[in-house]
Image (cartoon, rainbow, N blue to C red):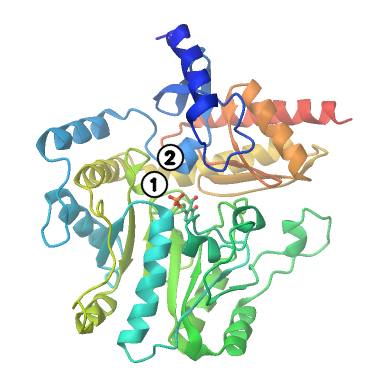
């Protein structure tokens, strides 16, 4: 199906004149105009077909145009697009909250809905501080996070994120945030040759807590796999130790599974790799598969009950017009049916494992490839520097594969519906792109 070329030209003009792209910079100019998607493939306005390993910003867990999800959204739109859940309810929001409870460990059974990962982070900040204040510890304000973590773009979320590219120019930032060392080998992170890996342990978290004073700390938040930092994979032992340290000091242990939740890492949730249960869980992307904006903060009934003591409101002083949006929740319920019905979590583990082995095989000896890493369908090819990573990504695009660069890492996070055949095609495109990149940099 071809896209009208006059319409495409007009859209390009309007794009250049009117649309403000988020995180502008690299996409300014002549961005890819994607007009259609089906499964793991998308098509641009010129009719070119691409395999998508970026999955609409790591969202499209079930691929594009999945008929079961499209039908559920259509049905819900024709029935009730939304009814605010402030002091009422709508069936998809209630159903999705119950579905979360059935998928998560028993302790995590109370879910608050919002609309983006960043809003989930803001929700956590307010929830954690109010929780401690209501329990008589108003001094517990500080939000701890990892130095390389990414938690969103809104003011609180960007303050919990110390990555220069996201934070620079955003001052003055709100107070009572601090970062601790990321549990990743610094030489690996810097793509520097080294004999032995050595990553900061949870002792560094403990030391930071002691220095700030445990009575000043509300929550510690981390991602089980650091996606935006370039798919960095901490040792699960760190999560276990961090969980223990947080319990010991009465600090809420928060896992940001906006990226990792719902099958991305080959388990339903990233925390399953470490067998830990957080006090608070943030999810977004994979739960709607990109079909609608939705995020969730799930916590324990104990945390929830604390808010009944709020003398001002008898509840959580926080919410959004679109919290529990019926259309988004209906989309999520259908996405979860697909994830379970098609065993996409198992597929993510299987095809992700195959891709990791194949990428390592085809990229062995490539001069600018420093490391290939992955967990499930969260994979990255670590290049020796960011300019080379950009070149590799551009070469992939020329060859029909969309990838995402994060600094010097080229990330591949395709839909969880990926077949072995398409996975191998993606790997051979990356190999060819690496060969071309090496040739161009000889
Ligand atoms: N947390 C994590 C781990 C993320 O990967 C992201 C987005 O990439 C966010 C939070 C922010 O989500 P959003 O872009 O929906 O605000």
Of the 4 image quadrants, the one containing the C terminus is top right
Q: Foreground: 308 or 230?
A: 308
Q: Is residue 275 visible?
A: no
Q: Is mark 2 in CB contact (under 8 Å) with mark 1?
A: yes
Q: Does 288 sit left or right of 397 as displayed?
A: left
**Looking at the figure, which quarter contains the N terminus?**
top left
Q: Which residue is mark 1?
A: 286
Residue tagged by mark 2?
416
Q: Residue at x 34, y 48 (%)?
A: 287
Q: Residues within 10 Å of mark 1 (few under 14, many from 20)?
A: many
Please state if 275 lies on the left or on the right of 368 as rendered: left
Coordinates of residue 71 in the picture (x, y in percent): 20, 30
**Depth check: 79 or 49 in front?**
79
Q: Earlier in the sequence, mark 2 or mark 1?
A: 1
Between disc 2 and disc 1, the foreground one is 1
Who is closer to the viewer here, 275 or 147? Answer: 147
* x and y, in percent, of residue 356 in the image: 60, 43
| Residue 392 x %, y % | 71, 33
Q: Quadrant of residue 312?
A: bottom left
């Amino acid at each position: 199906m071809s896209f009208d070329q006059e319409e495409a030209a007009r859209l390009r003009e309007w794009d250049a004149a009117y649309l403000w792209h988020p995180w502008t910079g690299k996409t300014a100019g002549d961005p890819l105009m994607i007009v259609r998607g089906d499964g793991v493939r998308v098509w641009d306005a010129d009719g070119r077909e691409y395999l998508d390993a970026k999955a609409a910003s790591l969202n499209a867990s079930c691929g594009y145009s999945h008929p079961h999800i499209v039908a559920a959204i259509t049905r819900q739109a024709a029935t009730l697009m939304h009814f605010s859940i402030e002091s009422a309810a709508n069936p998809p929001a209630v159903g999705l909250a119950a579905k979360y409870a059935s998928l998560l460990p028993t302790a995590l059974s109370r879910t608050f809905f919002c609309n983006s990962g960043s809003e989930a982070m803001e929700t956590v900040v307010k929830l954690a501080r109010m929780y401690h204040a209501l329990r008589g510890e108003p001094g517990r304000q500080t939000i701890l996070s990892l130095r390389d973590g990414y938690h969103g773009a809104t003011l609180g979320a960007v303050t919990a994120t110390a990555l220069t590219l996201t934070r620079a120019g955003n001052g003055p930032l709100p107070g009572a945030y601090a970062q601790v060392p990321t549990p990743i080998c610094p030489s690996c992170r810097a793509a520097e040759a080294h004999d032995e890996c050595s990553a900061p342990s949870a002792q560094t978290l403990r030391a930071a807590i002691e220095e700030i004073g445990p009575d000043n700390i509300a929550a510690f938040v981390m991602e089980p796999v650091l996606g935006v930092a370039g798919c960095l994979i901490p040792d699960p032992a760190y999560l276990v130790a961090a969980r223990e340290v947080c319990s010991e000091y009465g600090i809420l242990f928060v896992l940001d599974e906006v990226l990792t939740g719902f099958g991305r890492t080959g388990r339903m949730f990233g925390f399953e790799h470490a067998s830990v249960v957080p006090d608070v869980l943030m999810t977004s992307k994979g739960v709607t598969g990109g079909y609608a904006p939705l995020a969730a903060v799930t916590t324990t009934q104990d945390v929830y009950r604390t808010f009944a003591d709020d003398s001002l409101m008898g509840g959580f002083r926080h919410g959004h017009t679109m919290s529990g949006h019926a259309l988004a929740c209906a989309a999520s319920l259908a996405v979860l049916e697909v994830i379970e019905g098609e065993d996409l979590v198992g597929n993510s583990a299987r095809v992700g494992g195959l891709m990791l082995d194949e990428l390592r095989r085809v990229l062995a000896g490539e001069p600018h490839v420093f490391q290939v890493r992955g967990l499930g369908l969260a994979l990255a090819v670590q290049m020796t520097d960011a300019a080379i990573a950009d070149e590799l990504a551009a070469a992939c695009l020329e060859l029909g594969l969309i990838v995402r660069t994060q600094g010097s890492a080229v990330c591949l996070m395709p839909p969880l519906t990926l077949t072995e055949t398409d996975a191998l095609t993606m790997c051979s495109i990356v190999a060819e792109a690496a060969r071309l990149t090496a040739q161009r940099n000889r």
